[in-house]
Image (spheres, helix red, strand yellow):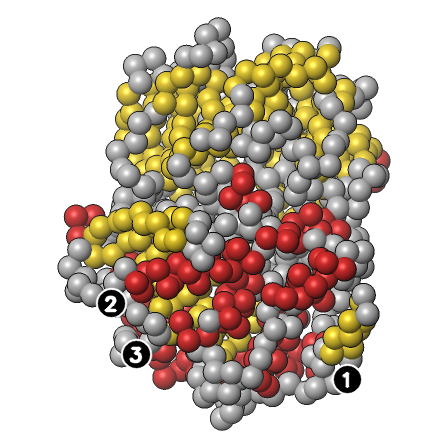
C-alpha cells in the first residue's frame, strides 16, 4: 500500500507498555559498583522451578515507576557509569567532536513533489531537529510548515511520528512523543493559516491516513495493553469522543491493526496480523464506514500485503513459496489469486509498488538488493536497475505520487555515503541528486570493503560485510563485530560516519549477516527463529572464529555490539564464548526472555509467541528458551568488559531486563573487568533523541570499547 508523506510508527523488537517518566536525582560519586539486594522469588512452569532473586527490580506498579528501591538502584548504577567513564572524558569529547565534524550541520533533503508543492526538510547549524518546508510548483517563497525544534523545546526527549499531508495540500496531520514511551499525540495544522485545529488525538501508535476527501483521518490507538487493536475514524471538527471504530481485531490477542491508502488513493486498506499471519480488508476511501471487502481470511503462517490499481488487487504473499510470489485478483473476487511472478528459490521478493505506467518489484538476489522495473502489459519484461558496487544497500525512497516518470532511489555502501538518485524509467538513466557531505573530509579511496563467507559449525555459509582502511597493517588486529539477527530484518551493509572513528583507529568493522535476519531469503529468517534460534547465536560466534582463522583479528581483539534482539545475541555469546571478546556493548538488550515470555499479562507477550515460542503452553518451547535466555544462563566464569544500556521509558525492552541481568552478572562473574549499566531516565528504546545527543552516546560507547581494548588514550 502507498502511504504518501505519512510515517508509520513501528518496530521489530519486543514491545511492552509505556512507563511514567521518573526524574533522576544526584548521587554521591561511588568508589565501588552497586550490589543489588537478593530477595527470595521463584516461579514454576512445566515442573521446572526457577529462582529469580532480582525480580524486585521490576516495579510492580508498572507502567508507573515510583518504587524508591528500584529508582535508587538505577541511579546508583548511573553514578557508577559516570565515575568509571570520567577518566575517559577527554576521549569521549574527542570522539564526539570528530563525529560531529562529519555532520553537515546546515543540511537538507532533496525536494520531492507531492501535489502542487515541493517538500523538503532542513537542519540549521547547531540544531538537534529538523524544520520542514514546502514551495509551490508554480513558484513562490518557501513556507515553513513544521519546526521540530520548537516542538522539542522544554522536553528531554522528542520524536516526530506520523507526518501526513492531505491530498489537497491544505492540512498537515502529525504526531509527537515527548517521553520515549511511543504513545504519540496527534494534531492537525492548517497550512494556509498556520493554526492548529482543536482536534487532538492522544495515544496513537500508527500513522494518520487522510480519507473522505481530506475531511477525516484514520488512526490507531495504543490500548491499555499497548496493542493497536482497532482502526478509528475522526472527522475534522467533531469531538474525538465521537470517533467511530471502523475495524476492531477481536480474534487474536497477538494481532495489531494498521492502515493506509492504495496507489490511486481510492481505497482504504486495513491490515491486521502478527509476525507470521496477516489478513487484509478494503473499503472505499471516500466512505470508510461502508461495507468492507475481505481479501482472504487469515491462515496461520500465511502473510500477505496488497495494493490496488484500477480495481485489480495485487497481492504479495508467501502462501505457496517461502520467498513470496506476486499475484492479482479483482476487487469483485478478491480471494481468487492468479500468479504474476512465481516464488523463486533464488530471488527473494520483498516488496512491490504500483505506479501509473509501470510497477516496481524489490528483493534480494544472493543477498544483494534488487530494484526492478516491470511492465503491466508484458509481465515478462523486467528492467533491473544496475548498481556499481559488489556490496551495497539500494531501494525505492520517497515516491509519493502515482503518476511518476522518475523514481527516487537511495543508495549507499560501507564505503559510499548515503546517496539520492532519480532514475528515469524511459531512458534507464540514473541521476545523482545528492550524496551525503562530510565537512571534515572523507576520501573513499582510503577504505576497502569486502564480502566474505564464513562456514558455521553446521556447514552453512554465513555472509559477512567488512570495511577497513587500506593501510590497516596486515595480520590480526582489532575488529568490531555487529549483528541483529531477528524478526527477518536484514541488517544492511550501510555507510556510517560514526563508524569511521573506529576504522580510522585501525579497526576492521564487520557485520555478520546471521540467520534470523532474511539476508539470504525467507528461509534464512526461519532458520533463526523459534526452535532454531540457537543458529543465530552460534553463527555469530562462528563468524568471529572464522575472522580469526582468516587473519583479520585474534581472540580477545574483537569488540562486539548489538541492540534489542541483538542485545539478546550479545547476552548469549557472552555466556557461551566469553574469551572471544575484548569488550561487548549490549544496547537495550532483550535478556530476561523466559520471564517475559511466560508472563501473558505483559501487553505484547502474546504477539511475540510466533517469533520466540509460547513457553506457557509448550514445554519444549519453555526448555528451548530457557536454554539460551541470557539472564537465566549467567554462570560463574570470567566475562569480558561489558557496557549495557537501558531506557526507563522503553516500551519494547523494559528497563528491568538489563538491570536484572547486570545485577546477576555482578553476582556471578569471577573477573575484575568493567561492567557498566547506563539507564536513560528520560528516553526509550532508541536512546536519546536529537542528532547530537544521539552521537554523544555513540562516542561514549566507542570510548568504552577503545579503552577496554587497550587503545585510545
Q: Is residue 390 left or right of residue 695?
A: left
Query: In the picture, which quadrant includes the C terminus?
Result: bottom left
The relative height of residue 675 versus residue 169 in the rendered view (above or below) is below
Nearer the observer, 551 or 157: 551
Note whether 192 is above or below 623 in the view shown.
above
The label on residue 40 is: 1
Q: Nearer the viewer, residue 694 or 631?
A: 631
Res. 476 mark: 2
Residue most extreme to the bottom: 31
Which disc number belongs to residue 81? none
Give the distance between the C-alpha atoms of the residues marked 2 and 1, in whole angstroms: 47 Å
Q: Nearer the viewer, mark 2 or mark 1?
A: 2
Q: Residue at x 70, y 53 (%)?
A: 613
Q: Judge left or right: residue 230 versus residue 682.
A: right
Image quarter of the N terminus: top right
Q: Residue at x 56, y 84 (%)?
A: 636
**Above-or-below relation of 43 to 215:** below
10 Å crowding of disc 2: few (<14), some (14-19), many (20+) = some
For residue 403, say whether it is visible: no
Label 2 or label 1, whichever comes before in sequence order: 1
Q: Callout 1 environment at 10 Å: few (<14), some (14 to 19), or many (20+)? A: few
Question: Would you call the spot at circle 3 few (<14 residues within 10 Å), some (14-19), or many (20 or more)?
Answer: few
Mark 1 element type: loop
Q: Identify the element where label 3 is drawn.
A: loop
Mark nearer the N terminus (1 vs 3): 1
Marks 3 and 1: in contact by CB < 8 Å? no
The answer for how far apart the CA atoms under marks 2 and 3 are is: 15 Å
Rendered position, 175 above or below 332? below
Q: Which residue is mark 3?
A: 710
Amino acid at each position: 500500500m502507498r502511504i504518501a508523506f505519512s510515517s508509520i510508527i513501528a518496530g521489530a523488537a519486543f514491545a511492552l507498555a509505556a512507563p511514567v517518566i521518573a526524574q533522576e536525582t544526584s548521587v554521591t560519586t561511588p568508589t565501588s559498583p552497586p550490589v543489588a539486594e537478593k530477595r527470595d522469588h521463584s516461579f514454576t512452569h512445566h515442573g521446572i522451578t526457577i529462582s529469580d532473586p532480582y525480580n524486585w527490580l521490576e516495579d510492580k506498579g508498572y507502567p508507573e515507576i515510583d518504587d524508591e528501591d528500584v529508582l535508587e538502584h538505577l541511579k546508583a548504577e548511573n553514578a557508577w557509569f559516570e565515575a568509571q567513564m570520567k577518566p575517559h572524558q577527554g576521549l569521549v569529547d574527542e570522539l564526539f567532536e570528530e563525529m560531529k565534524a562529519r555532520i553537515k550541520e546546515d543540511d537538507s533533503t532533496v525536494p520531492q513533489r507531492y501535489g502542487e508543492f515541493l517538500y523538503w526538510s532542513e537542519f540549521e547549524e547547531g540544531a538537534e531537529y529538523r524544520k520542514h518546508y514546502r514551495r509551490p510548483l508554480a513558484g513562490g517563497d518557501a513556507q515553513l510548515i513544521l519546526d521540530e525544534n520548537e516542538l522539542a523545546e522544554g522536553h528531554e526527549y522528542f520524536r516526530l511520528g506520523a507526518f501526513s499531508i492531505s491530498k489537497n495540500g491544505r492540512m498537515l496531520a502529525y504526531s509527537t512523543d515527548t517521553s520515549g514511551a511511543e504513545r504519540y499525540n496527534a494534531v492537525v495544522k492548517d497550512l494556509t493559516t498556520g493554526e492548529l485545529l482543536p482536534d487532538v488525538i492522544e495515544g496513537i501508535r500508527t500513522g494518520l491516513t487522510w480519507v473522505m476527501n481530506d475531511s477525516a483521518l484514520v488512526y490507531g490507538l495504543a490500548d491499555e495493553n499497548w496493542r493497536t487493536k482497532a482502526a478509528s475514524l475522526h472527522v475534522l471538527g467533531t469531538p474525538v469522543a465521537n470517533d467511530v471504530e471502523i475495524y476492531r481485531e477481536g480474534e487474536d490477542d497477538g494481532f495489531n491493526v494498521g492502515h493506509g491508502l492504495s496507489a490511486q488513493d481510492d481505497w482504504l486498506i486495513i491490515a491486521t496480523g502478527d509476525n507470521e499471519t496477516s489478513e487484509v480488508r478494503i473499503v472505499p476511501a471516500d466512505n470508510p464506514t461502508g461495507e468492507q471487502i475481505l481479501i482472504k481470511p487469515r491462515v496461520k503462517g500465511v502473510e500477505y500485503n496488497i495494493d490496488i490499481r484500477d480495481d485489480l488487487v495485487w497481492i504479495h504473499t508467501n502462501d505457496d513459496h517461502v520467498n513470496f510470489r506476486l499475484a492479482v485478483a479483482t476487487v469483485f473476487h478478491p480471494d481468487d489469486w492468479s500468479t504474476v511472478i512465481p516464488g523463486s528459490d533464488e530471488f527473494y521478493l520483498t516488496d512491490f509498488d504500483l505506479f501509473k505506467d509501470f510497477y516496481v518489484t524489490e528483493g534480494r538476489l544472493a543477498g544483494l538488493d534488487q530494484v526492478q522495473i516491470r511492465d503491466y502489459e508484458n509481465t515478462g519484461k523486467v528492467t533491473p536497475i544496475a548498481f556499481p558496487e559488489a556490496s551495497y544497500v539500494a531501494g525505492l525512497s520517497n515516491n509519493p505520487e502515482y503518476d511518476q516518470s522518475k523514481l527516487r532511489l537511495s543508495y549507499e555502501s560501507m564505503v559510499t555515503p548515503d546517496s539520492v538518485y532519480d532514475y528515469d524509467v524511459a531512458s534507464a538513466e540514473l541521476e545523482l541528486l545528492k550524496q551525503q557531505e562530510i565537512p571534515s573530509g572523507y576520501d573513499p579511496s582510503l577504505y576497502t570493503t569486502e564480502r566474505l563467507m564464513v562456514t558455521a559449525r553446521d556447514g552453512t555459509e554465513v555472509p559477512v560485510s567488512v570495511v577497513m582502511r587500506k593501510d590497516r597493517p596486515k595480520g590480526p588486529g582489532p575488529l568490531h563485530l555487529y549483528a541483529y539477527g531477528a524478526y527477518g530484518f536484514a541488517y544492511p551493509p550501510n555507510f556510517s560516519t560514526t563508524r569511521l572513528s573506529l576504522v580510522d583507529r585501525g579497526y576492521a568493522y564487520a557485520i555478520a549477516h546471521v540467520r534470523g535476519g532474511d539476508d539470504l531469503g525467507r528461509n534464512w529468517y526461519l532458520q533463526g527463529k523459534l526452535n532454531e534460534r540457537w543458529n543465530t547465536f552460534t553463527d555469530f560466534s562462528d563468524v568471529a572464529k572464522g575472522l580469526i582463522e582468516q587473519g583479520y583479528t585474534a581472540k580477545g581483539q574483537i569488540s562486539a555490539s548489538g541492540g534489542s534482539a541483538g542485545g539478546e545475541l550479545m547476552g548469549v555469546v557472552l555466556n557461551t564464548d566469553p574469551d572471544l571478546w575484548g569488550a561487548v556493548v549490549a544496547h537495550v538488550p532483550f535478556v530476561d526472555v523466559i520471564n517475559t515470555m511466560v508472563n501473558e499479562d505483559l501487553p505484547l507477550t502474546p504477539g511475540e509467541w510466533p517469533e520466540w515460542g509460547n513457553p506457557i503452553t509448550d514445554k519444549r518451547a519453555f526448555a528451548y528458551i530457557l536454554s539460551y535466555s541470557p539472564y537465566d544462563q549467567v554462570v560463574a566464569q570470567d566475562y569480558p568488559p561489558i557496557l549495557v544500556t537501558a531506557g526507563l521509558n522503553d516500551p519494547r525492552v523494559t528497563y528491568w531486563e538489563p538491570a536484572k541481568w547486570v545485577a546477576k552478572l555482578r553476582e556471578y562473574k569471577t573477573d575484575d573487568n568493567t561492567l557498566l549499566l547506563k539507564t536513560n531516565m528520560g528516553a526509550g528504546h532508541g536512546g536519546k533523541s536529537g542528532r547530537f545527543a544521539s552521537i554523544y552516546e555513540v562516542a561514549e560507547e566507542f570510548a568504552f570499547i577503545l579503552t577496554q581494548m587497550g587503545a585510545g588514550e
